Amino acid sequence: MNRIIVTRFSAMGDVAMTASVIEEFVEQNRDVEIIMVSRTHFADFFKGIPRVKFHEIKPKSTHKGLIGLIKLYIELLKYKPATLVDLHNNLRSKFIRFFFKLSNQPVGILNKRRKEKKFIINHKSIKCNKLPLVTEAYADTFRTLGYALNLSHKLHRKSRPIPENLREIFSKETSFIGIAPFAQHIYKVLPEEKMSRIIAQLNQKGYTIVLFGGGKEEKLKTEAWAEKYSNTISTIGKHSLSEELDIIANLNVMISMDSSGMHMASLVGTKCVSIWGATHPKIGFLGYGQSLENCVQVEHPSRPSSIYGNKPCDCDGVEAIDLVSPEMVMEKVEEVLLKNK
């Protein structure tokens, strides 16, 4: 079996996109086995994909520092790989591929298109400089090594079981709307007051709302929403990543920021209404198989102000995400629900 080491350590959404590409890659290359190297928490993204083995990286303990990366390299050599595909291209992955190059093994390196992205941010030239999807950039890394890969860019609806504690809720005759209301950077997050209005309107229509994502602070917010609105439940701290994917697979539609919630929806084939502020889907981070038509955003000459959403948008003193109204989101959700019937 031709074994390929694939490295992508973080972030959550990027690893989820990697899983979408690898799923199509192994289907088209049946003589290949993938050794996926990432953090333990992301192993569930790759479960069920044939001929994919997950190898954990422990950057804070076993694989910390240069000595730790040498240990990781030695561990990977045991698989007798034919090549390495670096889908991260960061400092850690550069060390790993350096070791592979010393052994004269072929290496594929992700082209992050940093210069093109920087040009778009500096010149706000998104209209004439749409970048290829990140998933295509991942695919190109395999192609440079001679592998055939033709991405479908279509959602593939997955049949997954509903977690036992939610089966009664999901037996109702209604539509189920998932919401991932948070993101790593504040400039990608719809203000809490607006999100509350969206939940209120969905609740009034009799839909069941399922809230995802976040840590302790976000858990308190979602539980407050769940207590306030009768048809709303919070999954934070109650379900594993695998179970969250199970739930998302049984939704009628997902609502997410430009964040991992969108990419998790893509993994299980669920349509996502994504909300964009300082970032822009045309930079390449639109969820795999998701439609540009289902993006909710307000075009503004100051967008995009950031690739990852870590910088504010100079939109006449108002953040780009603040230009999005609850009514815009509701209209798009209703549109998707109508098309699904």
Image: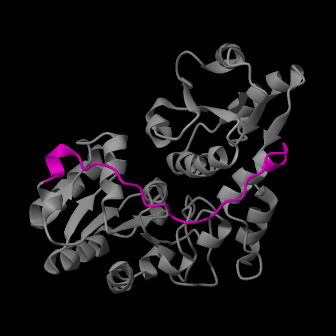
Query: Which residue is painted at 35% across and 57% down in the image?
Result: 249
Residue 105 coordinates in the image, percent (x, y): 86, 26
Kindly identify the residue that appears in the image at 23 percent across and 57 percent down: 222
| Residue drawn at point x = 46 percent, y = 74 percent | 321
Where is 78 relative to 339, above or below?
Answer: above
Residue 30's quadrant in the figure?
Answer: top right
Q: In the image, 203: left or right of 117?
A: left
Rendered view: 6 above or below 173: above
Q: In the rendering, at what x and y percent does residue 22 appear?
A: 62, 46
Viewer can see residue 319: no
Assess whether residue 323 is covered by the magenta stretch.
no
Q: How many marks?
A: 0
**Residues shaded magenta:** 143-167
Where in the figure is residue 296, as x and y percent of width and height?
Answer: 47, 79
* Nearer to me, 212 or 163: 163
Which of 262 and 193 lies nearest the eye of the viewer? 262
In the visual, does 197 lie left or right of 299?
left
**Can residue 271 be seen here?**
yes
Instruction: Indicate whether 224 appears above or below 7.
Output: below
Quarter of the image that includes the C terminus: bottom left
Q: Nearer the viewer, residue 164 or 7?
A: 164
The residue nearer to you, when weighing 55 against 274, is: 55
Q: Is residue 133 above or below residue 13?
A: below
When asked about the image quadrant of residue 305, the answer is bottom right
Magenta region, mostly helix, strand or loop?
loop
Drawn side of residue 279 relative to residue 145, left or right? left
Does residue 286 appear left or right of residue 231 in this picture? right
Work out which residue is located at the far front of the displayed protein and give it.
30
- The quarter of the picture where the N terminus appears is top right
User: In the image, is residue 159 part of the stretch drawn in magenta?
Assistant: yes
Coordinates of residue 243 in the picture (x, y in percent): 31, 44
